[in-house]
Image: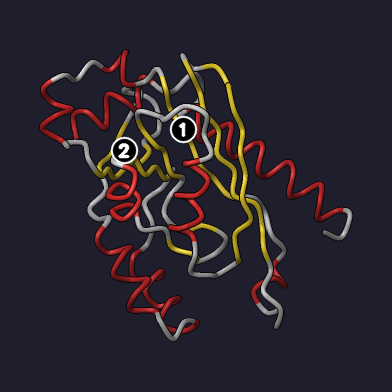
Amino acid sequence: MIQDFQHSFNVNTITKNLLGIDDGAFPAFAKIKKKPFKTLLVGVLLINMMLKWVGSELITVDGIEATDTIIKLIKKSPIQPNVIFLSGISFAGFNIANPFEINKELNIPIIIVVDRKPSMIDIKNALMKHFPDWEYRWQIIEKTQPLIEVKVTEKSKPIYAYSVGLNDYMTIEIIKHSILGGKIPEPLRLANIIATTITKELLKNNF
């Protein structure tokens, strides 16, 4: 897959169709309720950096279905994206998405983006403390290391990324070409705004 992209890599062509996925808000009590609490997972499709489609699925807080839910969401897109952006791999708390499985199922490159480097020690300790299946979740997280640092300009604050199906050069170029303002790729910025706005409004109304 990487070799195919290297052979015909054109960042302007690749970034024509991009899809970003982020999750919505959920209350703190969602983690201690006996009944599973769900929040929104939103996908946005950009064509030529313009919003063309928004899709959503529900996802369980601290559940285990993030990978399948993301695949289901992406398959709903009217046009297959050239690249999929994920806002990290931990959605709705510690519902861990497996980017390798998503890439294998869809044959689409994945770029994981976070705005700051996570503390791997803190993550592992939290998983060990709260999840009987912590080793399964940790193995996925551990595989998405190390992260590469990306700076849009010399003076801008860095973001961090990991990709599946792309090399570091292609990952950095795609990220830089997908940012319209700030430091977050536009598909993720819009997915975050939509998911957060909707879920916060629903929570106000006791969703």
Side (left or right) of 162 relative to 133: left
Residue 60 vs 49, above or below: the answer is below
Image x and y of residue 102, in percent: 35, 50
- Residue 44 shows which numbered tag? none
User: In which image quadrant can residue 98 be found?
Assistant: bottom left
The tag earlier along the polypeptide, 1 or 2, is 1
Residue shown at 55%/64% (left/top)?
A: 93
User: In which image quadrant can residue 127 be found?
Assistant: bottom left
Residue 197 vs 57, above or below: the answer is above
Q: Which residue is mark 2?
A: 108
Numbered disc 2: secondary structure: loop
Which amino acid, mark 2?
Answer: Ile
Question: In which quadrant will I find the N terminus?
Answer: top left
Nearer to us of marks 1 and 2 is: 2
Residue shown at 28%/39% (left/top)?
A: 149
Numbered disc 1: secondary structure: strand
Image x and y of residue 147, in percent: 27, 48
From mark 1 to mark 2, how far is it between C-alphas?
11 Å
| Direction right: furthest residue | 205
Residue shown at 27%/29% (left/top)?
A: 172
Which amino acid, mark 1?
Answer: Leu
Q: Which residue is mark 1?
A: 19
Residue shown at 32%/13% (left/top)?
A: 12
